[in-house]
Amino acid sequence: MKTKKIQQLIMSALLSLISSLAIAMPVTYSGVTFPTGDSSFADAYLPFTPGPNSITQGGITYDNPDYVLGAPDNASVSLGNGGTITVQFTDNSLTTSGDATKDLWIFEFGPAIEDFQVEISTNAIDWIDLGFIRGQPSGLDIDSFAAVTSGTLYSYVRITDDITNGPTSPPFAGADINAVGAITSGPAAPEDPVVSVSEPSSLALLLCGLLVAGGMRKRKA
Ligand SMILES: [Ca+2]
Ligand SMILES: [Ca+2]
Ligand SMILES: [Ca+2]
Ligand SMILES: [Ca+2]
């Protein structure tokens, strides 16, 4: 019995090692190589309301925030005039490289190359302004900003369309954000709400406890 349990533990450790190695396969998009693979990219977004003139038209959804998630593809979310989207890394984080190499890449999309403001945060409350950038894609060296502290794990990136630039009429006004990638990718920050996925399991535990208690009561009766 004991040997079987040890074998099972070794097998599960091996499997998790294999899957972590698979995740760590480098990927390249538009000439930019992400050493830690597709997990480098944003995993979630905070509630999104587009700015004016990003709409659904002719059956095409331009204001769908799902299009900002994951690796670069052929779909982007148009922020609308002056619109803002906040993305979150949940299985990774953005961190410092300790040198001048770029750490954060944002893939803007479409025939018009529109600029936007970039801010980063550990908690989606206190923001560090990294200024405006433009490019398809465009990268930022976060080490070069005085407010960025070495080794900090940033989970949030807030992107705001430059209202003074780009097409302003519907259906796809504002910068079109395809993907947001932390090329200098750290582990998921401990304060990430992703930690709260343990909530259903505590609920399950509570339910088990209630069932056991119910069973005991029945047996007593
Ligand atoms: Ca990710
Ligand atoms: Ca664009
Ligand atoms: Ca850097
Ligand atoms: Ca996309």
Image (spheres, helix red, strand yellow):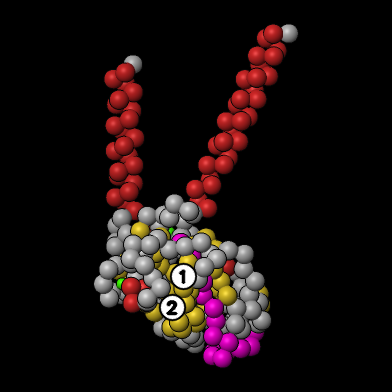
* Cα separation between marks 1 and 2: 8 Å
Kindly identify the amino acid type of the residue bearing the numbered disc 2: Leu
Vertical comparison of 112 with 67: above or below: below
Q: Residue furthest left?
A: 99
| Amino acid type, mark 1 | Ile
- Report whether 125 appears left or right of 102: right
Where on the picture, by quarter, is residue 92? bottom left
Residue 164 within the segment the image draws in magenta: yes
Q: Which quadrant holds the N terminus? A: top left
In the rendered view, would you say 84 is above or below 162? above
- Residue contact at pointers 1 and 2, CB within 8 angstroms: yes
- Find residue 130 and name its label: 2
Picture coordinates of residue 104 (x, y %)?
A: 38, 71
Residue 110 x %, y %:
49, 82
Looking at the picture, does residue 33 appear above or below residue 161?
Answer: above
Q: Main secondary structure of the magenta part?
A: loop
Q: Secondary structure at mark 1?
A: strand
Residue at image point 39% right, 78% down: 137
- Ligand 1: give its quadrant: bottom left
Q: Position of residue 87 (x, y in %)?
A: 51, 66
Q: Is residue 30 at least partly visible in the picture?
A: no
Q: Which residues are magenta?
A: 155-170
x, y (%) of residue 38?
38, 60
Residue at 49%, 48% (x, y): give it. 195
Horizontal relation, residue 101 to residue 158: left or right? left
| Nearer the observer, 190 or 200 | 190
The residue depicted at 43 percent of the width and 84 percent of the height is 134
The residue under the point 60% across, 26% down is 208
Residue of label 1 = 120
Magenta highlight on residue 208? no
Label 2 Cα neighbours within 10 Å, binned few <14 / some 14-19 / many ≥20: some
Q: In the displayed structure, would residue 209 be above or below residue 37?
A: above
